[in-house]
Image (cartoon, grey):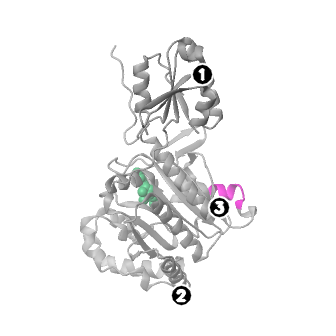
Amino acid sequence: MSKKQFTTHHGMVDILPGESEKWVYLESVIRDVAKSFHFDEIRTPILEQTELIARGVGQLTDIVSKEMFTFSRGDDNYVLRPECTAPVARAFVEHRLDQRGGIQKLFYIGPMFRAERPQKGRQRQFHQFGAEILGSSNPAADVEIIQFMMAVYDKIGIKNATLQLNSVGDPSCRLAYKNALQDYFRPHLDELSEISKTRFDKNPMRILDSKEEEDQPLLEYAPLISDFLSDECRTHFDTVKHYLDNLGINYTLNPRLVRGLDYYTRTAFELTSTDLGSQDALGGGGRYDLLIEEIGGPKTPAVGFASGMERLFIACDALGIEMPVTSIPDVYIVTRGAKAQEWAVKTLGLLRHQGKSATMDLGGRSIKAQLKDANRSNAKWCIIVGETELETSMFTLRNMKESTENQYPLNEIFELIQ
Ligand code: AMP
């Protein structure tokens, strides 16, 4: 019988050593930004109830209609979470976080799952970081969310991304807009793509999102939401823009940017980069004042963003941005013989106790191979120990960068490597 070679599922990727250090670094940047904006972390389960995602993300979306990984067990229907806003909203309602006092400012980092056709920048398991402010209708909250997102890219060194901004209004302005869109598209229904035809009745705003070629000429002259905003929505949007201007955050107004769901309200934004290819969105978000009520909670205005981590790395590669790699050992102990190994096990314990990153060979290799391994790991120091060193209690300390070495007693070595 031939041996079966197992692989990851299509569109799911192992993050291997050499790569994983970049992830740790990015996560540390996100946590630093979260700290400076005073956001708390929330970690929700990977599995949610299918019904929550169907209602929370919206039945008409691609995510719910064709991209969910679902299964049932007994009476329960599980879905691998495709995004984290609905789960965070669920946790907010379930744990009555509104009663924790104050406005909730939460961030998350983690894997999401969508059964999409894999391509560059599009996987079936991918990772997002994101943040949500729950309980505030203040335009300053919208700006804080945008600023949080931008701060991460800024710290990583991605400075050429474009922030696209729009206001999609609220249900009152959208009713008139929806009618205007339907009046505009109705005489041209035959010319629209199949997917846009299906959106015409229930959600004509999503036609504006269309990437289908046959829709493009019609989109060009479609009515704009900006002409339908109520006074309240317009004032909100003007304040958001004014605050962004004050902060020196550049944006491009894109009246065709819609977050397709009914509970999205007012501010909508997307960060795009020409370094990404066809999947050009680094992240996006907006205000969703109606979602929490939609999933059974109290009326709670909220705003948030989600960003793809894989796409951030793709942009870094395109721009030649290198992330600091942190997995370099301070000390590598090279041993010859069983006694030396016993000594090394004990000494590694002491070094680690002092906060040093310390390692040794676990493969019983020759001194030469161990030194090669120490070199490859970029260790700063090597302690070389064999029978003679143990007898004299004088150990060889090698400075790997300068290729110099000398003999010292252990207490001096501890001082030298500080
Ligand atoms: P969304 O939740 O669809 O607004 O997506 C937010 C961000 O997540 C996008 O801008 C992408 O950066 C990222 N993203 C969404 N879907 C995928 C995917 N299938 N693979 C990789 N990244 C994704």
Quadrant, the N terminus: top left
Indicate the secondary structure of the residue bearing disc 3.
loop
Residue interval drawn in magenta = 90-97
Q: Disc 3 designates what residue?
A: 296
Dominant secondary structure, magenta: helix
Q: Nearer the viewer, mark 3 or mark 2?
A: 2
Tell me what residue is drawn at x 36 percent, y 71 percent: 208
Q: Can you say whether 261 is above or below 371 in the image?
A: below
Task: Classify 77 as above or below 189.
Answer: above
Which is more N-terminal, label 2 or label 3?
Answer: 2
Screen quadrant of the C terminus: top right
Cα separation, mark 1 vs mark 2, equals 71 Å
Q: In this rendering, does residue 137 appear at all?
A: yes
Residue linked to disc 1: 345
From the Cβ of disc 2, is ligand 1 less than 8 Å away?
Answer: no
At x 36% / y 56%, what residue is drawn?
Answer: 315
- Please state which of residues 265 and 304 is positioned toward the viewer in this rendering: 304
Label 1: element kind: helix
Report the Cα–Cα distance between label 3 and label 1. Answer: 57 Å
Q: Position of residue 397 (x, y in %)?
A: 51, 28
Q: Which residue is at a point 59% across and 16% down the rendered structure image?
A: 392
**Badge nearest the viewer, 1 or 2:** 1
- Tell me which amino acid carries mark 1: Val
> Can residue 62 be seen from the camera position used here?
no
N-terminal of the pair, mark 1 or mark 2, is 2
Of tags 3 and 1, the one toward the viewer is 1
For mark 2, what is the residue?
A: 231
